[in-house]
Amino acid sequence: MSTIHKGSLTLRETLPYQFKARKRLGQNFLVDREILEKIISYADVKDDDVVLEVGSGTGLLTKLLQERVGRVIAVEKDQRLVQVLRERFKNNPKVEIINGDVLKTDLPEYDKVVATPPYNISSKLLFMLTDRKYKSMTLTFQKEFAERLIAKPGTREYGRLTVMIKHRANPEILDYISREAFRPRPRVDSAIVRITPKISIQKIDEKIFSDLVRGLFTQRRRNLRSALRHYVERRIGQPFTAMPDVEFINKRVYQLNIEEFEALTREFERSPLKDSIQNGAH
């Protein structure tokens, strides 16, 4: 899989006035039209789709999307860019512009997500979006973040993020993007990722699952027996002796696959410790 980079525009060519990107908002704008077209092609949007775009920025992707879909819900936090977007898409009934933090905004329903969101909210955004109803998501992330999403058990990249997302969705890296395609240029390359919901999610207690995964990955290199003892004793404040009867008890935490984390959750659902773990879950 090659890293794609065509001929980027300058930021000045995408905005009608001198604009200084804000680092605290994670503003690095993908300004290469050919790559934006490729993202839309990967997203396989239809003319009746309602598409959520997070971090609409200068409106380049917004413009291309509204030509192909039924409606675009464009969410942008930066008031300066919202003014640009409202001017650019005034009197356009296919574009709904929302000024706000996507993590705190009550979003309308949509079919697909197609976006180049700020990378500083990647984890929180993905956890939020995969909790909602959607057909597919096509997003850009930092290359390293994307590779954590698809990591295999036993690898350095495999961790809490991998398990939590793969429990509820199917992530796939479609392509890589050179840092040269962005303005201002970031220090890292990026990846285009497609995420589709799992057809059948295991029926388990999500609070217990989330807390187990979070707690155990703070001890990722311990074997499960040792990590569980430490995790539970911190919860209940006394020695833990009722070790779950699972065949993978001697595996290291980072070697456990998704199904094993789910099986472990079911063990705790039947345990007297269930309430203690639920009360400690975030």
Image (cartoon, rainbow, N blue to C red):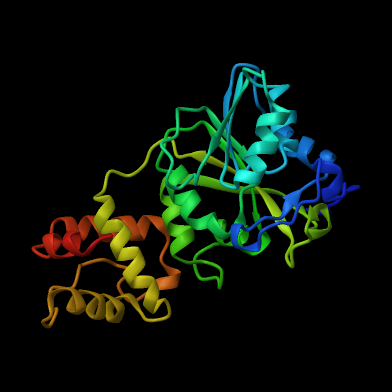
Image coordinates for residue 67, horizontal then vertical, percent: 73, 22
Horizontal arrangement in the rendering, residue 8 relative to residue 129 (left or right): right
Give the answer, above or below, for where 46 lies relative to 189. above
Give the answer, above or below, for where 87 lies relative to 26. above
Please state which of residues 187 and 93 is positioned toward the viewer in this rendering: 93
Please state which of residues 139 and 259 is positioned toward the viewer in this rendering: 139
Report the number of discs: 0
The quadrant holding residue 109 is top left
Give the answer, above or below, for where 144 lies relative to 200. below
Please state which of residues 265 and 87 is positioned toward the viewer in this rendering: 87
Say whether residue 42 is visible.
Answer: no
Image coordinates for residue 182, horizontal then vertical, percent: 78, 54
Please state which of residues 225 and 274 is positioned toward the viewer in this rendering: 274
The quadrant holding residue 17 is top right
Give the answer, above or below, for where 163 lies relative to 156. above
Residue that sits furthest to the left in the current view = 272
Residue that sits furthest to the right in the current view = 7
Q: Residue at x 81, y 50 (%)?
A: 18
Say whether residue 195 is visible.
Answer: yes
Q: Residue at x 28, y 43 (%)?
A: 203
Horizontal arrangement in the rendering, residue 32 relative to residue 187 (left or right): right
Image coordinates for residue 171, horizontal then vertical, percent: 56, 48
Image coordinates for residue 266, horizontal then vertical, percent: 23, 55
Q: Residue at x 49, y 49 (%)?
A: 126
The quadrant holding residue 185 is bottom right
Picture quarter with the C terminus? bottom left
Horizontal arrangement in the rendering, residue 91 relative to residue 227 (left or right): right
Horizontal arrangement in the rendering, residue 208 relative to residue 48 (left or right): left
